[in-house]
Image (tube, rainbow, N blue to C red):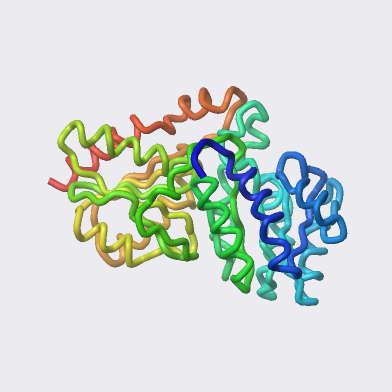
Amino acid sequence: MAGKIATRTAYGEALVELAPKYPELVVLDADLSGATKTNSFAKAFPERFFDCGIAECNMTGIAAGMATTGLKPFCNSFAMFTAGRAYEQVRNSVAYPGLNVKVIGSHGGVSVGEDGATHQCVEDFALMRAIPGMTVLCPCDGYEMKKAVEALLNYDGPAYMRLQRSDSEIFTDEVKDYDFEIGKGVCLKDGKDVTIIATGLMVGRAVKAAEILEGKGISARVIDMHTIKPLDEEIVLKAARETGCIVTSEEHSVIGGLGEAVCGLCSEKCPVPVLRHGVMDEFGRSGKAEEVLQHYGLTCEKIAEMAEKAVSLKK
């Protein structure tokens, strides 16, 4: 599965590929099927697709009702709308009764680009993590995304998953012994001096940051944390003990996301320096995706810089 693909595109492909195997799968969208890539499912399985219009809150309630009948609804819109606008319905109609609804937030983070601050949701992990019993995922590439969709179809309970708008390189299909399991991180590269724990778009950049660090004589471990909640405590604590410091990286606010999850765990069970790399309590801004990412320092060079700092803090 070499090449580049947006995780939203891989997601749309996975829905179509898995639909025959899972007849209980139904897909709902809020008038954005072209953007969320559920339009291919709508074309292939029109009787199992429901366009609810620009009414995300109502869509979430409909999905909750469907789940009570044994269906497996995947509820789609931009992250700003499923995690943001429909927050109350996700909390009270889906998570509180523990219904089997998968809430999908496409176009998460600042790499949405030209859509600007109103649509660049950098709070979705925080919002969804705070809901009791909610599982939170952010796959890093197209291969991992397809694995995540099937895992969610086999997972009984409420979950949120972020999709990425822009294309990114596929690399997890070449990871030796790669296995996707909800709640389990994946060690992509071993290292002894520092650990970089990343999610989503930043995983590929973390791998490149490790290459930069290697050139400076620093051995960096890289962990792909596709599941932000429940956090894989075992892999984090093992990294903390063995490398002595951690950098987290996410295309999300440093408040409430992966970084805070790792900080909370380490402060309680294995105190080591943890530096959070992400959006520093700011709104996004309009621009080409890569330029916006550069503006907020969401680069492999910045990850490497923070890793060097983390190493210096443990001495």
Left or right, 190 with respect to 120, comes to left
- Above or below, 36 against 213 in this view is below
Q: In the rendered view, does 260 fall on the left or right side of 108?
A: left
Q: Indicate whether 55 appears above or below 206.
A: below
Q: In which quarter of the image is residue 309?
A: top left
Q: Where is residue 88 in the image (x, y as percent from the top left)?
A: 72, 60
Q: How many labels does the image show?
A: 0
Q: Where is residue 178 drawn, in percent x and y?
A: 40, 58
Q: Residue at x 43, y 61 (%)?
A: 179
Res 81 seen here? yes
Decide if residue 273 is in sight here.
no
Q: In which quarter of the image is residue 74?
A: bottom right
Identify the residue at image location x=43%, y=49%: 172
What residue appears at the point 56 percent right and 28 percent down from the top-left corner? Answer: 289
Q: Is residue 156 above or below residue 5?
A: below
- Indicate the position of residue 206 as horizontal and vertical percent values: 36, 40
Q: In this view, does 122 lie to the left or right of 244?
A: right
Residue at image coords 75%, 69%: 23
Q: Nearer the viewer, residue 213 or 266?
A: 213
Q: Where is residue 296 in the image (x, y as percent from the top left)?
A: 46, 30
Residue located farthest toward the left when viewing the structure as drawn: 315
